[in-house]
Image: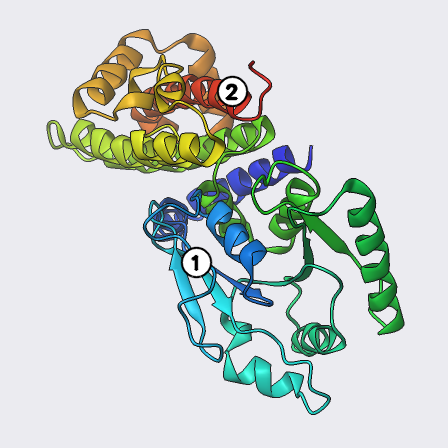
């Protein structure tokens, strides 16, 4: 329900911009979501668990060319940046380990590595948080930054029993250090769909500004059906924004301008959807390698043409089909969704809305089939 409300809130924000004729705000929101501009700092010892976590957040395995390595290629006192190969403006920053020395100054660490510039800060560990890592958390929070979290990374040797013990010990450390309402999220680096990662993601997205929250969602690998649903809802809000702009363009009496703009914008959105839902060939190849599956089996699950390739001809075909088949029900939806003064240009809005929403649903169905096979639910 929280995710549905979040998407509705985004839609309301976009509608408010239309009401105020703030077209620039809508374009900026669309661009931020399409680019997925977000920076996350990951603090902690540079070990195999941290490297795997960084790779999994980017949909990569250890064998991929741009994967984080163990040992790290970065000098111990240097930070390293890992852009997402499919969403280059989504960057993970590997910050150096926090010293265990009694002379450690959290304020100096935060200043030296510009910790406050990141959208979120993840403090990782494999046993329990150190006193100095708690000091960094406290320093960040004192500077009015809410998006800082403790992440307990599981290792290959851990069992359910040892993980529970570690989490309990970690919470006790945080309580002893005076952390109010302490939270520790347990994450399996090689399989993010397990343990606490999805719960952590929900908390982090709730703490981030609205557009950043959606930008993060669209850049993460699709590891569960709940994420497929959330991504579909986010794309439908994006479609609404694009359709609103399309409606405005169609009011300009220049032949074919609206249809050309519609197709161009639609291709951008659907390209982002294909990559975000991990349906493109490269993403499926990497996913198959990561999970030890035959990539041909994953590719065969795609029944929507747009899941395989977002071609201009297929997008134009869908727009033309929607223009013929625009239903009365969708027209009524336009009357509810659009501000009164904009209803005169609602036809282009309706066509874009119907064509792209149907495409997003079709691609989402393919993504759910891939998730089912990858997680073992489809076997």
Q: In terms of image quadrants, where is residue 207?
A: bottom right
The residue closer to the viewer here, 277 or 7, is 277
> The C terminus is located in which quarter?
top right
| Viewer-proximal residue among 58 and 73 | 73
Tag shown at residue 60 = none
Give the number of the disc on residue 373: 2
Residue 160, placed above or below residue 240: below
Q: Secondary structure at mark 2?
A: helix
Q: How packed is label 1: few (under 14 Cα within 10 Å), some, or many (20 or more)?
A: many
Seen from the viewer's position, the closer of residues 2 and 8 is 2
Q: Position of residue 118 (x, y in %)?
A: 51, 67
Query: For mark 1, what is the residue?
Result: 69
Q: Is residue 28 left or right of residue 237?
A: left
Q: Is residue 226 left or right of residue 263?
A: right
Q: In this image, 211 relative to 202: left or right?
A: left
Disc 2 from disc 1: Cα separation: 28 Å
> Do residues under tags 2 and 1 come within 8 Å of each other at their CB atoms?
no
Q: Choose the circle earlier in sequence order: 2 or 1.
A: 1
Quadrant the N terminus occupies:
top right
Q: What's the residue at 64%, 40% (across, down)?
A: 198
Instruction: Tell me where residue 274 appears, x and y as whole percent.
Output: 35, 30
Residue 282 drawn above or below residue 190? above
x%, y% of residue 149? Answer: 67, 61
Q: Residue furthest left?
A: 255
Q: Is residue 6 left or right of residue 234?
A: right
Residue at image position (39%, 47%) is 26
């Amino acid at each position: 329900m929280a995710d549905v409300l979040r998407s509705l809130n985004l839609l309301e924000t976009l509608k408010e911009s239309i009401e105020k004729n703030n077209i620039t705000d809508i374009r900026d929101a669309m661009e931020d979501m399409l680019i997925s501009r977000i920076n996350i700092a990951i603090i902690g010892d540079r070990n195999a668990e941290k490297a795997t976590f960084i790779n999994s957040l980017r949909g990569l395995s250890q064998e991929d060319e741009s994967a984080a390595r163990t040992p790290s290629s970065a000098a111990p006192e240097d930070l390293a940046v890992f852009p997402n190969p499919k969403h280059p403006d989504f960057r993970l920053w590997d910050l150096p380990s926090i010293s265990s020395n009694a002379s450690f100054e959290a304020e100096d660490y935060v200043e030296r590595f510009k910790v406050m510039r990141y959208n979120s800060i993840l403090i990782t560990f494999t046993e329990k948080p150190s006193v100095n890592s708690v000091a960094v958390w406290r320093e960040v929070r004192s500077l009015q930054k809410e998006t800082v979290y403790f992440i307990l990374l599981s290792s290959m040797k851990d069992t359910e029993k040892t993980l529970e013990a570690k989490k309990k010990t970690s919470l006790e450390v945080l309580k002893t250090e005076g952390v109010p309402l302490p939270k520790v999220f347990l994450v399996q680096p090689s399989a993010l769909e397990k343990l606490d990662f999805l719960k952590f993601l929900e908390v982090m997205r709730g703490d981030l500004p609205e557009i950043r929250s959606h930008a993060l969602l669209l850049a993460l690998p699709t590891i569960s059906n709940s994420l497929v649903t959330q991504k579909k809802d986010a794309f439908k809000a994006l479609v609404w924004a694009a359709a609103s702009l399309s409606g405005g363009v169609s009011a300009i009496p220049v032949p074919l301008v609206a249809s050309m703009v519609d197709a161009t914008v639609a291709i951008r959105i659907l390209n982002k959807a294909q990559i975000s839902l991990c349906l493109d060939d490269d993403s499926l190849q990497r996913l198959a390698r990561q999970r030890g599956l035959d990539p041909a089996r994953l590719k065969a699950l795609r029944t929507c043409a747009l899941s395989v390739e977002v071609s201009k001809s297929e997008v134009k075909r869908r727009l033309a089909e929607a223009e013929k088949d625009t239903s009365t029900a969708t027209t009524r939806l336009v009357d509810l969704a659009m501000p009164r003064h904009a209803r005169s240009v609602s036809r282009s809005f309706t066509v874009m809305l119907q064509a792209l929403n149907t495409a997003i649903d079709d691609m989402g169905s393919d993504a759910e089939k891939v998730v089912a096979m990858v997680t073992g639910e489809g076997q």
